[in-house]
Amino acid sequence: MPAGLGQKFYCPNGAAVLAAASTSSSPPTTAVQSSSHQQQLVNHHHHGPQAGTIQNQGMPARPVDTRTAVVDPEPDRPIGYGAFGVVWSVTDPRDGKRVALKKMPNVFQNLVSCKRVFRELQMLCYFKHENVLSALDILQPPQIDCFEEIYVITELMQSDLHKVIVSPQALSSDHIKVFLYQILRGLKYLHSAGVLHRDIKPGNLLVNSNCVLKICDFGLARVEEPDESQHMTQEVVTQYYRAPEILMGSRHYTSSIDIWSVGCIFAELLGRRILFQAQSPIQQLDLITDLLGTPPLHAMRTACEGARAHILRAPHKPPSLSVLYMLSGEATHEAVHLLCRMLVFDPLKRISAKDALAHPYLDEGRLRYHTCMCNCCFSIATGRVYTSDFEPSASPKFDDSYEKNLTSVWQVKGQ
């Protein structure tokens, strides 16, 4: 068994959980605050305004215990479907808690599929961050010969950001800031671990009833490749959130593709509609250049010849970034300034997650999150005790070197 998985990788009581879940045809989330501490939190990067309390807006006005926040009166049921499996809401018979059980079927059809699934499981067991979904358990099969599907237990989250965006519920500026702060906080952790998510979209950002957000679905995630001569797959990221370098056929890319996706989501939170909603990759690229203008040649240095020719054949377009102010009344100068730092055509000039977290727009989101939503800070009789690191990094980096030694499906099964 590779280092890092530890005893968490297999659940000794997996059979009991499966038996309980199978009842639904297919088996298968206070306190006194000191004003000086609040100001210290805002001043983590620089001075900024303090957040006001959100009343009756779906966000907590006091600390909440997310471990007991899940209220689901319905029996075990499917709560989500994806390209690589189905997620069920189930009761863990060991402690009676409601959890999410992800069924990953037909994972051993070929070696490529095996490696992808095994990498995802490794990551789920490695991640230890409040804004990144991690595995609580991975169930052990009764016999390796009949090991054709995998069941992963994770924390149960009630919804996702896509459902929030399309819902009629009003989203205040405080909602948007605290959501964006959590996305970037989780993404900074992933990138510090050397991991590219490669499919950041609203549906992969889980949200619970306290507005705590977790990045999920690492089926397309991989370790960043430092060698630019090594080709990487282009079949990544849902089209609406796909960075221009991927749309233009770049065979190598970096963590900046995730930042582009976050920028698209930020605009979607502001405007309650998809920013670049095209019918094809070419049309997607055209919509991007309509907003950002025709990119300079150096920004297309990694593009394939056909994509570069397509851009150069079209009439020159000036940037029209001022239209971002029309997304909604929440599109303030600070919001648009940060958004424009994310939606940069040249990936080398795109802001990083770490630098985005230092932007003054997120001061109130940081304050709100660490005042009454996080588990890394706590309250005492005299006030709030804040963590020394509001946006922690991963250490050590995620190691995928084990993949080189996996040469057969049977070998992966044995892991």
Image (tube, rainbow, N blue to C red):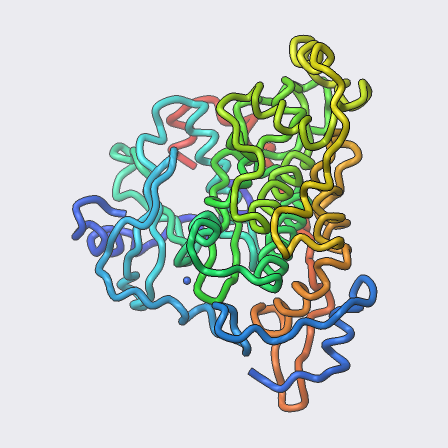
Total number of numbered discs in the rendering: 0
Q: Is residue 240 above or below residue 151?
A: above
Q: Which residue is at the front of the view, 302 or 345? A: 345
Q: Residue at x 72, y 63 (%)?
A: 363
Which residue reaches farthest bottom? 381
Residue toward you, 336 or 130:
336
Q: Is residue 373 visible?
A: yes
Relative to 87, 375 lies left or right:
right
Residue 387 position within the rendered picture, expressed as x and y whole percent measured from the top left: 69, 70
Q: In which quadrant will I find the C terminus?
A: top left
| Direction from residue 380 to residue 358 in the image, left or right | right
The image shows residue 382 at horizontal and vertical percentages of 67, 90
Q: Nearer the viewer, residue 286 or 365?
A: 286
The structure residue drawn at horizontal position 16% and vertical position 52%, both measured from the top left corner, is 23
**Where 384 sits versus 126, above or below?**
below
Rendering coords of residue 276 (x, y %)? 57, 33
Pinpoint residue 4: horizontal percent, then vertical percent: 55, 47
Along the horizontal axis of the image, is 140 left or right of 192? left
Residue 94 falls in image quadrant: bottom left
In the image, residue 8 above or below residue 55: above
Residue at (74%, 43%) from the top-left corner?
352
Residue 399 seen in this snapshot: no
